[in-house]
Image (cartoon, rainbow, N blue to C red):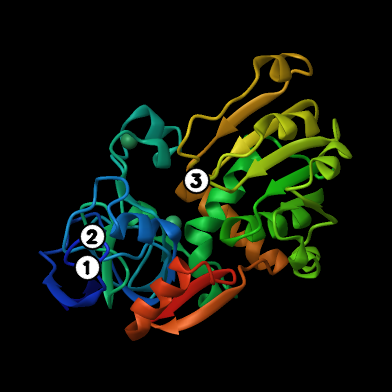
Amino acid sequence: MSTVKAFAAAEAKDTLKPFTYELPKIGNEEVDIKVHYCGVCHSDLSMLDNEWGMTQYPFVPGHEIIGEVVKIGSEVKNVKVGDFVGLGWNSASCMHCKTCMDGDQHLCNSVEGTIVGRHGGFADYVRSHWSWAIPLPNGIDLKKAGPLLCGGITVFNPILLADVKPTDKVGVIGIGGLGHMALKFLNKWGCEVIAFSSTPNKKDQIIAMGATKVINSKDPKELESIAGSLDFILNTTNVTLDWNSYLTALAPKGRFHTVGAVLEPMAIPAFSLIMGEKSVGGSPLGSPALTSTMLDFCVRHDIYPIVEEFPMEKVNEALQHLRDGKARYRIVLKA
Ligand SMILES: [Zn+2]
Ligand SMILES: [Zn+2]
């Protein structure tokens, strides 16, 4: 195997077409993965459309990969040929800076994205550095695990960063691809979980995902009814909301954490933070070690995203389904 059969866009917003490319000789620390499943994430669309100005064409999306190791470089020790691994948004980091040595490889200054300047997982094979080829725990459901590698770790990391306790009362804003996984994690963590949704007609589904209560985020009265009660709020939306009303919902010492990449500056009144010693934070993804811990937690508690499966050949239909806002709640391509 050195010719990879992939699906690529020739320019921004183009449909994907079959595309082949040659892999150079494998590096000492690299791993080649045969793709079995690959999730479709909003970031694939953002990159396809060059929203962040860093896309190189031809562009092969795909960064929620579940696959089998088929070749390893001479220095690779964490996986062997035949192992099943997951590969997410990141696929390499320097492995020698202080941040990497601290185990925060996802924050390394030279961290490399799986679909940034390299070809991703909408393909039969994909290559990464060994450190981001995460061995999968026994018993994991390969069909549904892909989205955990990007969306899943994105909402799992904040639970540890914000030191959320099982006794905490918490809130999740936005019950979509990210938010529904956050509800499941926080429910199994032991928390009382409030879901903030602008479509409360999904209430029964949202309760089934692990929320104890659904608050209509469009109704200021409902938001006021929980003022001062939440220890932690996770925002998964990327639109501007009335942030102060959420800060008001926090209990003293409460933490507001965003993983939604809100493009406009967020208006945070200092007075809301000062009175009550509240804090605001954010985070991207998580480290390989934490990703591994998360996958063990998922197997132990049977936590998976709700997925819709498309065959890889129907990748353009799958992307359109996501563009139309119809994904319930994550899409996975089967190779
Ligand atoms: Zn993603
Ligand atoms: Zn580094």
List the residue tagged with mark 2: 12
* Coordinates of residue 3 in the picture (x, y in percent): 13, 77
In this image, 55 relative to 183: left or right? left
Amino acid type at mark 3: Gly
List the residue tagged with mark 1: 9
Dot 1 alpha-carbon crowd within 10 angstroms: few under 14, some 14 to 19, many 20 or more: many
| Real-space CA distance between mark 1 and mark 3, rounded to the nearest whole angstrom | 28 Å
Task: From the image, state whether disc 3 or disc 2 is nearer to you.
Answer: 2
Q: In what element is the residue under mark 3? A: loop
Quadrant holding the N terminus? bottom left
Along the line of sight, the residue nearer the viewer: 46 or 92: 46
Tags 1 and 3 touching, CB below 8 Å: no
Task: From the image, state whether disc 1 or disc 3 is nearer to you.
Answer: 1
Instruction: Tell me which label, 1 or 3, sits earlier in the chain.
Output: 1
Dot 2 alpha-carbon crowd within 10 angstroms: few under 14, some 14 to 19, many 20 or more: some
Q: In what element is the residue under mark 1? A: loop
| Position of 38 relative to 99 (above/below) | below
Question: Which of the four quarters of the rendered structure image does ligand 1 lie in?
Answer: bottom left
* Coordinates of residue 122 in the picture (x, y in percent): 31, 72
Tags 2 and 1 touching, CB below 8 Å: yes
